[in-house]
Image (tube, rainbow, N blue to C red):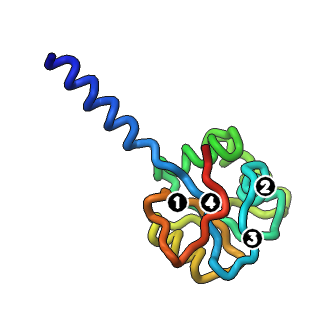
Amino acid sequence: MQRRSLFLAALLAAGAAHAEIVVVVNPANPATRMFTEQAAQFFLGKSNMFTPVDQAKDAPIRRDFYQKVAGKSLAQMEGIWAKAEFSGKGGAPKSYPNEEAVKKAVAADPSAIGYIDKAAVDSSVKVILTLP
């Protein structure tokens, strides 16, 4: 019985670690929805229609986001950004220390696009994509 309880506790903890990630924009932004492939374009630097806002380098949500949206590891993303910076075509999105800071940055800039845990959504941002 003890083993079963430990297993259930571990299962619940693992589930809690995987947040539901949403892509958000400023409420004034006319976009109402977006496909995963479109979101990837902004964070990979292939489109400048939106200004991407990133989570802190060590945030677990950052690793999960890039895996889900672009199928890339953080190391692969660093390589993509380094290549873009070297070629003069841009670089990594500006990162912020936590979800509240990401939300504030998106709320302050109608062209910004970011990602946060769905539980952190409030009226200061608009959800345009929920990642599977």
- Closer to the N terminus: mark 3 or mark 1? 3
- Closer to the N terminus: mark 1 or mark 2? 2
In the image, taking residue 2 as reference, residue 76 lies left or right, namely right
Is label 1 in a helix, a strand or a loop?
strand
Amino acid type at image mark 4: Val
Q: CA distance from mark 1 to mark 2?
A: 17 Å
Quarter of the image with the N terminus is top left
Q: Which residue is mark 1?
A: 116
Amino acid type at image mark 2: Gln
Q: Which residue is mark 3?
A: 31
- Closer to the N terminus: mark 1 or mark 4? 4
In the image, taking residue 26 as reference, residue 1 lies left or right, namely left
Q: Residues within 10 Å of mark 3 (few under 14, many from 20)?
A: few
Please provide percent x and percent y for residue 38.
78, 55
Amino acid type at image mark 1: Ile
Is label 2 in a helix, a strand or a loop?
helix
Q: Which residue is mark 2?
A: 38
Residue 64 falls in image quadrant = top right
Is label 3 in a helix, a strand or a loop?
loop
Q: CA distance from mark 1 to mark 4?
A: 7 Å
Amino acid type at image mark 3: Ala
Q: CA distance from mark 4 to mark 3?
A: 11 Å
Q: Are marks 2 and 4 in contact (CB under 8 Å)?
A: no
Residue at point 47%, 52% (across, down)? 59
Nearest to viewer (mark 2 / mark 3): 3
Residue 10 falls in image quadrant = top left
